[in-house]
Amino acid sequence: MLDDREIKSLILHYQNNKDKDNTFNRIKEILSEYIYHFPAIAFDSYEEDDKGDFYLYISDRLEKILTEYQVQENCLFKTYFYLVLRRHYLNFIKSSTREKKWKTESIKEETVSYQDKNKEDENNDLEKVSLLLASLPPFYRLILKLRCPDFLSPEDFLEIEKYFHLKPGEMIEKLNIILEDIREKEQKRIQFLSAKTKSPKNPYRFFPIASPQAIAKMLNIYPRQVSKWLFEIKKIAQQKIGEAYVP
Amino acid sequence: MCPNDYQIAAWVDGLLNETEKKEITEHINHCPQCLEKVFFLKKTLYREKYFISKKSLLERIVVFFEKELLKIKEIPNNFQSNLLQYSYREENILKNYLEISMEDVNLILEKEDDFLKLTLSGTGECTLSDKNKRILFSGKVSQKPFFLLNLKESYFLSTETKRVELYAESTNDKTGVES
């Protein structure tokens, strides 16, 4: 993973013209993975062409980015770099036909190779959740999105304020509660499955889900209330989409 | 006035003092653009773990494979040097996987946090067992079974004529494949 001290030290060397070419190449080598995968990580754009073109786009601008970076600032380089990449990516997709292509391309999973059968299941699950979200009243839609944080958007934090009187800034901070909960569960799941004698059929959730306890902690309410809401969502799902489905 | 990108990043990283943090939090509560930025960062920093390799593990595997190939070439004639053929391309580092072909059984090795994901494919049959000879899989690989290997253990994969051992060496903390 990215060593903050190392990268900042290299950038400082670069800015001070110390062995500039080699330093630049070393920095580029370290950052290449982050740049290459950025469209997929941040914008669900998995097309190899897009990733490759964006990589070249940033490669042309990397010297300027490094020259302008203020090493003394009090943040991790990677976090700041993601904001820089975001700004550049939004410009990148606005150019020529990129925007149209980006908006109409469907999401494809490619970084982890699933069995073909799993791929069909994954798309079905995504579709089910999307269908369910569309059929729910706004409040339950919000609860389900907290359950499946991959579907969350910034506007949902304004909704949280509306229903729970909790400020968006403070809620974004508390989002870590859900993300850590998911990370712990996934780790345990992977460890459990690796100990099994048979090959696992579906070791991965196709998208991560948060526990009622984590959601409750984030919203400062009792877990049983969240469980109650999820049960209501299940009932609505039965009525609207004919299947008592809640991830 | 909106905080600059450094301040936004520091807020997300939790590296501000209490006063600065409070000011920026209060600003985020009322600014949709800054709210979007911090949400973007939170989500991106969380998602990156699914994409970015723990390079030290994968690089060690790749380097070890290359060393093994060199080693095989130097072994005397009675050792079949074409036992292990593998395809390794530069972009595999970015894709975090390595492919090995053992005639009609193919292995794909991928980084998965602290585990190695082994996917089998092809038309042949093989047996996968751990160091205690406990069989984890035996049969045709056409269904593409896959496994998460804890490399603190050793594993053996055998086809009719070939055998591969997957292991990590604790002395050098080296991970690799040996046939």
Image (cartoon, coloured by chain):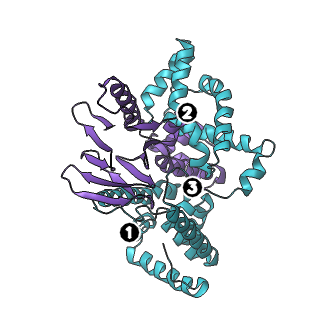
Inspect this view and state whether residue A165 appears.
no
Measured in 3D between alpha carbons, the distance from the residue under mark 2 to the one under mark 1, in whole angstroms, is 38 Å
Q: Amino acid at mark 2?
A: Ser
What residue is drawn where x is 29% and y is 42%? Answer: B165
Measured in 3D between alpha carbons, the distance from the residue under mark 3 to the one under mark 2, in whole angstroms, is 21 Å
Left or right for A181, reference B95: left
Left or right for B104, reference A197: right
Q: Residues within 10 Å of mark 2 (few under 14, many from 20)?
A: some
Q: Are marks 3 and 2 on the same chain?
A: yes
- Tell me, yes or no, whether the two marked residues, 1 and 3, touch with CB atoms within 8 Å: no
Residue B88 percent across, percent down from the top left? 48, 35
Q: Amino acid at mark 1?
A: Gln
Q: Which chain is cyan?
A: A
The quadrant in which the N terminus of chain A is found is: top left
Tell me the SS state at disc 3.
loop
Q: Write down the colour of chain B.
A: purple
Residue A232 percent across, percent down from the top left? 50, 83
Residue A184 percent across, percent down from the top left? 36, 57
Foreground label between 2 and 1:
2
Q: A67 or B111, which is in the foreground?
A: B111
Q: Which residue is mark 2?
A: A32
The chain under label 3 reads A
Residue A86 percent across, percent down from the top left? 63, 42
Relative to B173, does residue A101 appear above or below in the rendering?
Answer: below
Q: Which residue is mark 3?
A: A109
